[in-house]
Amino acid sequence: PRYDLVKKKNYIMPFMPIQASRGCPHNCDFCTVTKFFGGSYRLRPIDDIIRDIKASGSKRIIFVDDNILANRKYARELFTRLIPLKIQWFSQCTVNIGRFPDLCRLAAESGSLGVAVGVDSISQASLNIVGKRQNKVSDYYRLLKSARKNGLSISLSVIVGLDGDDKDIFSGTVKFISRIKPFLTVLNVPIPYPGTGMANKLEVENRLLHKDWSRYRGVNVVFSPKLLDRRQLETEALSMYKKLYTFKSIVIRSLSQPLRNILRTFLSNIIMRRSIYEV
């Protein structure tokens, strides 16, 4: 890969991108992954990945995989091969990583700074509606605590405003996140990207407000929610973001991370706070 073409000076924290796997074995209604990559899960030869890391000339790597742990045997081999390289890396996986403490420890040993986990909702009813039955809300705290205990920092991705959500979802989600203390939280309203099951359903039900793709991002509500007012959802989602990124919240979350990640967590949260308060 022509990593020499990347202008590292243009990035605050330059992590070089590498892909180890492609696709996801799950098929949630709101997700674009299987629409882009199909329903299969493919793995690259680990020798090629090691070659790419060395070619990048960087000790900071982001694996752009959507679910780097979907094949645990492969993940174990990959992490083992990463240890001698002494890199730092970040990627994405499911909450079920907490079921495998040995894999968490191996990921940490191989240089993982953390993983982004899509819990997506604290409402089991909402998860079931969008086909994310592999997530069990009753297991969240135990699994995330296990991952952290075994050396991993966790970034949470959460959605509010799914069809099973009522007004209690806002305060409940803030309480949940405050209890978990992830190093970062990415909060979204449902975004019905073209071609997804969610978009098809909303179009059939005549609930899409428009197809201005430039507004299909962040906390812009582009459909009519089932149990909530559209304006209420936008307002409450932004309010949640600001509550989660007060200076007090940032300090508490930062100090709860593994020692090697405290400063990085604090700086990442400050950057996120600035983007939120500029909205």
Image (cartoon, rainbow, N blue to C red):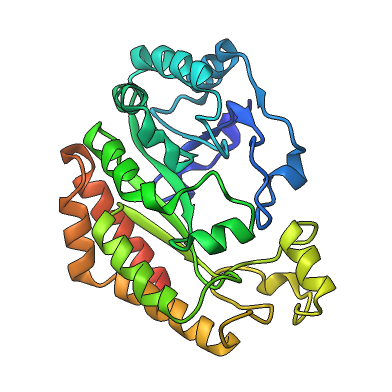
Please provide percent x and percent y for residue 250: 23, 63
Instruction: Tell me, yes or no, if residue 268 can be seen here.
Output: yes
Residue at 43% x, 73% y: name it.
169
Residues 36 and 2: in front is 36
User: Which of the 4 image quarters holds residue 65?
Assistant: top right
Q: Is residue 235 above or below residue 98?
A: below
| 171 left or right of 234 in image | left
Please provide percent x and percent y for residue 164: 56, 70
User: Which of the 4 image quarters holds residue 146?
Assistant: top left
Q: Is residue 259 above or below residue 192?
A: above
Report the quarter where the N terminus lies.
top right
Please provide percent x and percent y for residue 106: 33, 21
User: Which of the 4 image quarters holds residue 162?
Assistant: bottom right
Instruction: Tell me, yes or no, if residue 90 can be seen here.
Output: no
Residues 163 and 267: in front is 163
Q: Is residue 66 above or below residue 176?
A: above
Residues 216 and 73: in front is 73
Q: How many marks?
A: 0
Residue at 78% x, 61% y: name it.
194
Residue at 64% x, 52% y: name it.
131
Please provide percent x and percent y for residue 12: 40, 51
Q: Is residue 101 above or below residue 225?
A: above
